[in-house]
Image: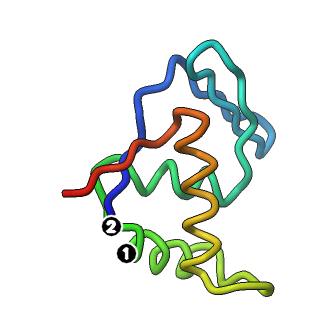
Amino acid sequence: MKVQRCPVDDLLTRDGETAVLAHGKALRLSAVAVAIYDLTEHEIEVESLAEALESQVGAPADRSTLEATEAAVAMMVRHGILTRSSR
């Protein structure tokens, strides 16, 4: 499965915090979510995204990098920040 970021209405980064305005909702992004957003300008396989994330932010302590990436992607899809593609 591939994912890509959706257009957002606004993106604000200040004092190390990032928020997006998407679909009339303001959402604060975690450091991992910001990395995902940055890495998904173009479509990317979730497995490749997980590898890139592990290189940038390290591996999670409680589960595999792929499981953590899939969970973060699912949350970002629910909030309209990412879209999935089966291509």
Measuring 80% from the left and 40% from the top, which residue is drawn there?
15
- Residue in front for this viewpoint, 13 or 50: 50
Measuring 52% from the left and 56% from the top, which residue is drawn there?
36
**Label 2 secondary element:** strand
Q: How many marks?
A: 2
Q: Quadrant of the C terminus?
A: bottom left
Where residue 76 appears, as percent x and y from the top left, is 58, 45
Q: CA distance from mark 2 to mark 1?
A: 5 Å
Measuring 77% from the left and 46% from the top, which residue is drawn there?
16
Quick one: which residue is furthest to the top in this view?
24
Horizontally, is 61 left or right of 70 in the view?
right
Residue 82's disc is none
What amino acid type should be assigned to the residue bearing mark 1?
Ser
What amino acid type should be assigned to the residue bearing mark 2?
Glu
Residues packed near mark 2 inside 10 Å, few (<14), some (14 to 19) or many (20 plus): some
Where residue 80 appears, as percent x and y from the top left, is 52, 33
**Callout 2–callout 1 Cβ contact below 8 Å:** yes
Q: Quadrant of the N terminus?
A: bottom left
**Label 1 secondary element:** helix
Measuring 63% from the left and 86% from the top, which residue is drawn there?
64
According to the picture, the residue beneath numbered tag 1 turns out to be 48
- Up/down of 76 relative to 1, above or below: above
Horizontally, is 72 left or right of 47 in the view?
right
According to the picture, the residue beneath numbered tag 2 turns out to be 45
Where residue 37 appears, as percent x and y from the top left, is 51, 48
